[in-house]
Amino acid sequence: MERGCVARLMTFVDADVAGYAELQYGAAKGRDRLVILTTLGSGIGSALLWHGVLVPNTELGHLEIDGHDAESRADISAREEYLSWEEWAVRPTAYYRTLELELIDCALQCDHEDLATCPRFQEMLAGDVTRPQGSAQPLGFAEPHGGHE
């Protein structure tokens, strides 16, 4: 992409750009703790901000829920599967509840000062999350009437 360009070309994930903007101008400015920004549209984007630093490419929309990639079931395009707004709304709700549980589990298991070096957090980002015995279980996706996949 840089061929023919005079300036250096850089590409970013849209949610990372939104996260960076929040760090510079928005709600995350000056925060010295974890801030998570998500976008919900044709996918689920995420930006994780840790002590004023963007952790790039977190892709938290790809958490697995009931054997499905959350993004493929909860983004707005999933509503076009003949779901009513009420049927569809259950899906992003399940995603956000699961994300919250994953982050709580991670925080409880990581006593690292730097979250980015926590092995449990790295597993979560890699999508290799296995729940420890006795941990909270994620809420599943409700099937729409008629059972469309």
Image (cartoon, rainbow, N blue to C red):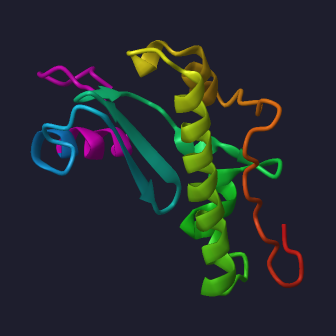
Q: Is residue 93 left or right of residue 48?
A: right
Which residue corresponds to the image point at 42% horizontal and 52% vertical from the top-left? 38
Which residue corresponds to the image point at 38% horizontal and 28% vertical from the top-left? 56
Tell me residue 55's x, y (percent).
37, 26
The image quadrant where one finds the N terminus is top left
Q: Against 88, is 94 above or below?
A: above
Which of these two is toward me, 35 or 72?
A: 35
Q: Is residue 4 left or right of residue 83?
A: left
Which residue corresponds to the image point at 54% horizontal and 39% vertical from the top-left? 103
Q: Against 64, is 148 above or below?
A: below
Q: Against 101, is 39 above or below?
A: below
Across the whole image, how many numbered discs are drawn on residues?
0
Tell me residue 37's x, y (percent).
37, 48
In the rendered image, which quarter is residue 91 located in?
A: bottom right
In the rendered image, which quarter is residue 133 located in?
A: top right
Q: Against 71, is 8 above or below?
A: above
Which of these two is toward me, 60 or 105?
A: 105
The image quadrant where one finds the C terminus is bottom right
Magenta residue check for 10: yes
Which residue corresponds to the image point at 35% horizontal and 45% vertical from the top-left? 14
Q: Which residues are magenta?
A: 1-21
Tell me residue 72's x, y (percent).
67, 55
Magenta residue check for 149: no
Dominant secondary structure of the residues highlighted in magenta in the image: loop
Tell me residue 78's x, y (percent).
65, 68
